[in-house]
Amino acid sequence: MTESVLLLALLFLAHILGDFYFQPSSWVENRYEKHLKSIRLYQHVLIHTVFVFTILLCAGYSLDIVCYGSAFVLVTHLFIDVVKSYLPRTSTYFFLDQVIHLMMLVIVWACITSDYYKVTAHLMQKVDYKFVVVLIAYSVVLKPASIIISMLLEQWSEIARGSSNKEEEKESTKTKAEGEDIKSLVSAGKVIGMVERVLILTFVLLNQFSGVGFLLAAKSVFRFGDLKEKNDHKMTEYVMLGTLLSVTITLFIGLITLYIAKGSLGIK
């Protein structure tokens, strides 16, 4: 049973890596623009197929089972992504797309782990599936969580951006008059959010919830103090909402992971 669950966890991890870490945003744009004619679409699907092929082969299944499972993932992933490329880019379709992809992996897993097939690979006997669950949690709180938060905040982004642009114009006029050139770090906000979620997840898994409070207090001193000085209420509310969503999602993932991995990896 443990080997079977580990296999499913590895398939899920492979999906997360393939969809969020081995697929640049330019590939996604290319797919939405060219649909079936997109070369990046086939490269993306090939990466998922190679991942599944490698996992099943290392798990000790016969070559025909490995090929059948990989072919199923190739065809279904291609079909799902092509259909999605014609749909609006909304959070609803994003979640639906991910759920269907994971369901396809569950079908593959259910078919090959029946009584007719046994997991024989040494890797499956030694690696604890709870460790993979923790890896999944960390991979989810990085790029997938960033995308989810961006989608949830999309309806307010234009308002916040418009408010921010006004402030930037004021600052630009002021700095030019003073002969200064102040620029913010490129994508610094995304990196800060990722680091923040990794730290929160680590604190949760270590049962150090006080660390979460300290982290939020430290961020508040720097971020919200700066916003207060600008007297920009809309932008302040936008940033606060983003922070609360980030913390809530990470706490939710952390508590679920803690429940599953309790007693493993030194987690108590």
Image (cartoon, rainbow, N blue to C red):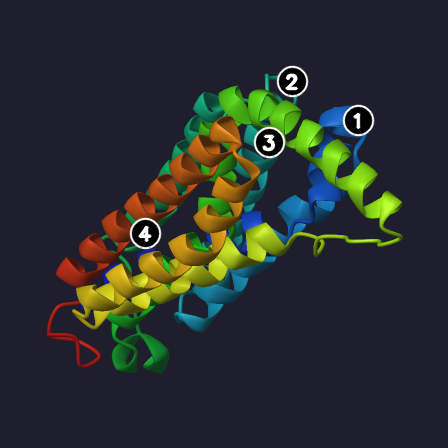
Return the residue at label 1.
34
- Left or right? Give the position of 120 relative to 81: left
82 or 16, which is in the foreground?
A: 16
Q: Position of residue 104 (x, y in %)?
A: 41, 38
Of the two numbered discs 1 and 4 in the rendering, the one whose residue sits closer to the viewer = 4
Q: Which three-letter amino acid code belongs to the residue tagged 2? A: Tyr
- Left or right? Give the position of 6 relative to 101: left
Residue farthest toward the front in the current orientation of the protein: 178
Which numbered dot is residue 250? 4
Mark 1–mark 2 CB contact (< 8 Å): no
Say which label, 1 or 4, has the lower sequence index: 1
Say which label, 3 or 4, has the lower sequence index: 3
Distance from disc 3 to disc 2, alpha carbons, whole Å, reads 9 Å
Q: Which three-letter amino acid code belongs to the residue tagged 1? A: Lys
Say which label, 2 or 4, has the lower sequence index: 2
Mark 1–mark 3 CB contact (< 8 Å): no
Q: Secondary structure at mark 1?
A: helix
- Left or right? Give the position of 184 relative to 74: right
Q: Position of residue 77 (x, y in %)?
A: 55, 37
Residue drawn at (29%, 60%) of the image: 117
| Within-10-Å neighbours for mark 4: few <14, some 14–19, many 20+ | many
Return the residue at label 3.
81
Which numbered dot is residue 86? 2
- Left or right? Give the position of 37 relative to 9: right
Q: Secondary structure at mark 2?
A: loop
